[in-house]
Amino acid sequence: MTKVTMNVNGRSRSGEVEGRTLLVQFLRETLSMTGTHVGCDTSQCGACVVHVDGQAVKSCTMLALEADGAEVTTIEGMTNADGSLGVIQQAFQDYHGLQCGFCTPGMVMSAKALLAENPKPSEEEIREYLEGNICRCTGYHNIVKAIMAASGQQVEPVAAE
Amino acid sequence: MSLDQPEPIFLGGTVGKSVAKPDNLEKVQGRAEYIADLYRPGMLHGAILASPHAHARIRGYDLSEAMQAPGVVAIITGDDVGEGRMGAFIKDEHAIAKGKVLYVGEPVAAVAARTEEEARHACRLIKVDYEELPAVLSPEDGLAEDAPILHEQLADYIKVFDAGAEGNLCSRTELSEGDVDAAWAECDVIVEDEYTTQPQAHVSMEPCGALAEVDPNGRVTLWSANQSVFRVQANVCESLGLPMSKLRSMTPRVGAGFGNKMEPHIQPITVALAMKAKRPVKLILTREEDFEMVRARHPFRVRMKTGAKSDGTLVARECEVLVDCGAFADDSPGVMGYSLLMCGGPYRIPHMKASGKLVYTNKLRFGAFRGFGNPQVLFAGEQQIDQIGEKLGLDPFAIRRKNMLREGDQWFVGPRIGSNGLGRCLDAVERASKGSRADGSPRNFGLSVTAHISGLLGTGAIVKMLEDGTISLNTGATDIGQGSDTVLAQICAEELKLPFDTVAVASPDTDGSPYNWGTTASRVTYTTGRAVKAAAKKVVDQAMNHAAEMLECDVDDLELREGGRIGQRGSNSDVTFAQISGRAHWAVGGPLVGSETLVFDEPTHDPKRAIALGLPFPRIGVFSFAALGVDVDVDDTSGQVTVHEAWSAADVGRAINPRLVEVQLHGGFVQGLGYALYEEMVWDGARLANPSLMDYKVPTARDVPDAIHTYIIEDPDPTGPFGAKGAGEIGLNAAPGAIANAVAKATGARHVHLPLTGERVLAGMLDPGGPQD
């Protein structure tokens, strides 16, 4: 067992890990931060996306040891300091960009990374960026709309309130 | 929703409003708890050893080395689970393989250990002595005279549904109306072909899992990813020989189901482990295990023949299916029977004959999957409708309008149809899709229509008015993400004329919830909604009686007012729900509780018009209708098909929550698009060759069009809550037929095999009339 320390959502967190412990296992099991999900074992589904030093990473493809000393941001770190929803979370809520919600943490984290790189992405750019995040419920329609809206772009309203 | 479409009807309260799902708030923050997120004090982790053989006798186990492995607390095998068997139609399945294994991937042993790694490590140390047996890998092989038999005791099994089970034949169904054999002579045009469809994996993003613990009295508490806490309870208790009162089944948030989590997965194994270990055990499948162990959509072989008169009037259809059941019956007899019930499509066809055989094979069980047999037969049937139209010079809309069922008609074999907005669905799709693309190029347009039932089996609701006049609603229906908690709360709030957020929805719990068969068969809004509305009405009636005493007037002079007040008509005086409920709790009559249970009880079969043998659902439901248009592009060098635009219109009776209906149409269409174009579970001999998301392709955001237009048609059903009918499956059903029709338009070639891969479509383009494989 080796001790690792990383800054997770602005707080220094440490734990003992084995060499094979994945970052996602460290987050979920050692730190009990279960917002990051595991939907596959081959790095396809994207439910486990977090940010490591500002880069979107599938936390099932990285060892906890590799993140020693890193700045890690997870879905739990996406709300504002006052507890209100972040812009992307609010857009997923407003545009109904989710159903079962299992893919949502990864979707929100990928969207955050996309908008950091490309603040006004086109619909096509959003779809291309989300290729590594699978959703089986929504057909992606409202997820794309939510990200467009989160980037401050005009979006057709969804069904009447 | 386009602007030329009437807005869904809004009643003034919460029904018809796109209320946001309250659970979304925790989900966007990563705070929702799914099964893998639950922990209990002293909890162990489970892992499963899977069978490497398709068919083998188990001679014995050597657990000695595994028991000595670090962290191991308990191991179970078939020796630990008794003789009990479970199954919705035929009770043919033990909790874990016992005596024989019947497919590669079948659970043979399971370990509970301190950590998941230790449990998996110990599994690899278990030695099982197998005697390999010849395997049955196709339904055709299963029916051969000298075929190895999977279930040697089939005759002795308890059969809830007994339809000719013998040898490897699990069930057979025969339905007929009119005189098909004589009717062909009346036809001017006949089309006939044989079609095959592939197995599809559900791929709910959350893999299956369960957590069980046993109290000192031996009573089990079980949480699991499920579509019905009551089916979980029944399956675990039947397979482990427990009285149902000894097991409490509950649910955390569920990461979708699509049919995969309706019947058992690893709940019985988890409970058996917890009982043996005498500690809580959590078992979560990997994605690979979820592919190999649970269930999938049935592959079908369909022979279909359709005949019409020269004016396009349909005269006769014959449909014969051969269905791969997999190793256990599961929901398969229901799927096959339902596919035959639906094989005529929503048309008036006076002469119909449908028959099918369901055959056990040494593969994982095939079972319920959104659509439930309907997409397979529609792929054949909806192409044949187009082919007849082509021969007679009728466009796809015209031939469908000419033959579609009208309100007051009966469905094949006899069920009442109820409301029918199919004509309006066709109008919406035609109006929106007509003409060319925005750039002026012509469309490669394909159309399919469909119908689907909602109804089926027992359900209940308990509505409690709390002391302060707010409401607790308990139905036992699992919300798997589609939003049934929201929709049922809307129905309840509407009936009580209360704001939506005054109704709290209890999480399903077999101890406290009324029975609910499950979140399946597009039934919760319609069937459970009826119970909710009736239970809420009983609370209103009780409150009215209190109000009459409190206001010293006749009940008939009272009216229910918005916001939880009851007052005298023509007067400002009223009393609040809080005042009424306080009186009921502390002074007069007792707390206000309304409950209702019901079962859909209208007959499927009308013996005056049809013969039905082996009909699995004698009381089935009311019908929703839909039309789907697609415009596709076909790459002329690779044959790859992409959907450019889609128009999906569904008659759902009344959209209780229009946005949630739209998302069903979006998500259903995309799941159907994957099924139509590339999703396929492939077996290499007896072993599934692609049990991972690396090798099994599901649609990503890039693979689906920006433009999926949805149109909600509201033709209220007189029996539905505020007129509502089901919406869960109908968006998927029509996708393969519509896409195949569009591909035929684009390439000139008809396809009889799903999925419509680039290779197949290219072969069709090169030789449109040539053989297909």
Image (cartoon, rainbow, N blue to C red):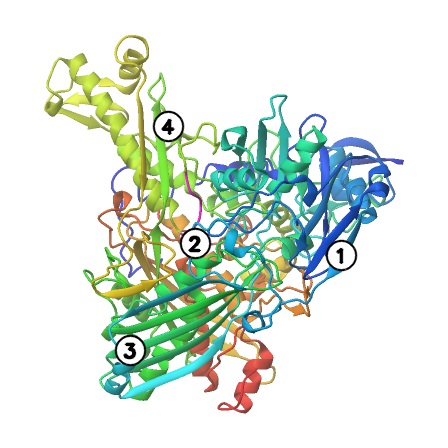
Q: Which quadrant of the figure contains the N terminus of chain B?
A: bottom left
Q: Are marks 1 and 4 on the same chain?
A: yes
Please check the rendered image and state whether residue B367 is part of the magenta-colored stretch, yes or no.
Answer: no
Q: Which of marks 3 and 1 is in front?
A: 1
Q: CA–CA distance between discs 3 and 4?
A: 57 Å
User: Label 1: which residue?
Assistant: B130
Q: Mark 4 — on which chain does it sit? A: B
Closer to the eye: label 2 or 3: 3
Question: What label sits on residue B664 in the rendered view?
Answer: 2
Q: Nearer the viewer, mark 2 or mark 1?
A: 1
Question: Closer to the N terminus: mark 3 or mark 4?
Answer: 3
Tell me the magenta residue range: B516-521
Q: Are marks 3 and 4 in contact (CB under 8 Å)?
A: no
Residue under pointer 4: B502
Q: Which amino acid does label 1 sit on?
A: Tyr
Q: Nearer the observer, disc 3 or disc 4?
A: 3
Left/right placement of residue A3 relative to residue A28 reads right
